[in-house]
Image: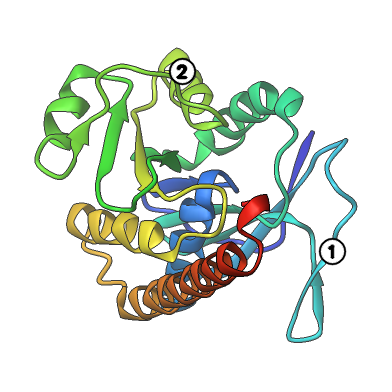
Amino acid sequence: MKFVEKAKIEFEQPIIVEAFPGTGLVGSIAAYQIIKELNLKYFGYFEIDGIAPLTTIEKGIPYPPVRAYANENLIILFSDVIIPPLKINGLAEFIVKTFSDKNPKLFVSLGGIVAGKSEKVFGIANREELIENLKNYVEIFDFGVVGGISGNLLIKCQDNGFDAIGLLAETVGVRPDPRGGANLLEVLNKMFDLNISVEGLIKEAEAIENKLKELAEQHLKMMSKSRKEYPMYI
């Protein structure tokens, strides 16, 4: 495992945000919006054995699938591919050790929780003081299991003496959920004064929801028609 820096940036106690693909892609959606609006610089990429052999093309230029964007105060860890489960523990530890020399102020992990709706954002943290601060912004995730890299990253940060929090947005399920991403952004805006617009994501969410409602109505009409035409088989 290796991180290749592609730009020199003078960091000032940056906040490091991990937003790898997870439930509903809520973290990835929120992170992509931040990268675009803050015009973050392509900072480098991860070489990880065993990930999908995919290359991302943006404006004609190829980029590795697992990469980082940054400015002086913020580093976003982003991926176009799902991280294999067997790589998660090692990657979490590698992230902490790789960025420890940047004197990070805080590690933040973004993820989702399947809830059948997109309303709340829950918080977890690796110190009691951080939990108390999170209560000003989100509801605390009291008990349960967290999948993906979020829990691992918080533990590795704690082992190495770094503060870390996780923000977990409710999401409708496995499909991309821009409303869940918007909910994460609203919390991040309040916590870190990012001033990232969520209007586009809300409109996208409404379009998806309207389309799903339309499909559901069409399905009900088809089922109703089938019952009338073939009552013995329904």
Q: How is the image coloured?
A: rainbow
> Residue 147: percent from the left, percent from the top?
53, 27
- Decide which of tag 1 and tag 2 comes sooner along the chain: 1
Q: Position of residue 46 (x, y in %)?
A: 74, 46
Left or right: 221 as drawn, with respect to 15: right
Q: Is residue 4 above or below residue 56?
A: above
Residue 75 spot, x, y in % from top left = 48, 54
Element at label 2: helix
The image quadrant of residue 90 is top right
Q: What residue lies at 44% left-to-right and 46% top-to-bottom?
A: 16
Question: Left of 7 or right of it: where is 201?
Answer: left
The residue lying toward the viewer, choosing from 29 and 226, is 226
Residue at the spot 81% in from the left edge and 39% down from the top edge: 48
Q: Which mark is residue 155?
A: 2
Disc 1 element: loop
Return the residue at label 1.
Answer: 55
Residue 178, position in %: x, y? 43, 65
**Amino acid under disc 2:** Ile
Q: Amino acid at mark 1?
A: Thr
Q: Residues within 10 Å of mark 2 (few under 14, many from 20)?
A: some
Q: Nearer the viewer, residue 142 or 232?
A: 232
The reply, left or right, for residue 116 in relation to residue 4 is left
- Where 182 falls versus 203 (above or below)? above
For the residues labelled 1 and 2, the Cα–Cα distance comes to 31 Å
Q: Residue at x 71, y 27 (%)?
A: 85
Determine if residue 197 is in view: no
Depth order, front residue of 142/108: 142
> Residue 104, located in which quarter of the rendered image?
top left
Quadrant (top left, top right, bottom left, bottom right) of the N terminus: top right
